[in-house]
């Protein structure tokens, strides 16, 4: 009986360690996703500005 409890506690300990490691990995991936989203937002903003500038140049060229 005592051995069974020790084994169960050991398994629970491993499970908790795996859960903690998984949580750290999720946090790291979340940071990467947030950074990528921020980078994409910045790139789309730059693209929008470039398109506006091109549009203005075309308008000036027509005049």
Image (cartoon, helix red, strand yellow):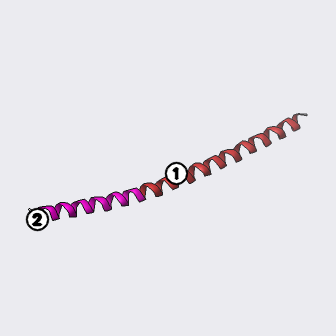
Point out which mark residue 2 bears.
2
User: Where the C terminus falls, by quadrant?
Assistant: top right
At mark 2, the secondary structure is helix
Q: Report crowding for label 1: few under 14, some 14 to 19, many 20 or more residues within 10 A (C-alpha).
A: few
Q: Residue at x 18, y 60 (%)?
A: 8
Which residue appears at 52% of the width and 55% of the height? 32
Q: Quadrant of residue 23?
A: bottom left
Q: Quick check: 25 left or right of 16?
A: right
Dominant SS type (magenta): helix
Q: Is residue 10 magenta?
A: yes
Residue extending furthest toward the front = 2
Question: Could you tell me if the residues under marks 1 and 2 are in contact, i.e. CB atoms within 8 Å?
Answer: no
**Label 2 neighbourhood size at 10 Å, few (<14), some (14-19), many (20+)?**
few
Residue bounds of the magenta highlight: 3-24
Q: Classify mark 1: helix, strand or loop.
A: helix
Q: Which tag, 1 or 2, sits closer to the chain's start?
A: 2
| Residue 50 in the image, given as x and y percentages of width and height | 75, 45
Judged left or right of residue 2, residue 50 is right
| Between 6 and 44, the one nearer to me in the picture | 6
Q: Is residue 37 above or below residue 21?
A: above
Can you identify the residue that label 1 sits on?
Answer: 33
């Amino acid at each position: 009986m005592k051995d069974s409890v020790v084994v169960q506690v050991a398994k629970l300990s491993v499970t908790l360690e795996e859960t903690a490691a998984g949580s750290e990995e999720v946090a790291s991936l979340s940071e990467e996703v947030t950074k990528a989203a921020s980078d994409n937002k910045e790139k789309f903003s730059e693209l929008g500005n470039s398109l506006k500038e091109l549009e203005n140049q075309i308008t000036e060229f027509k005049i």
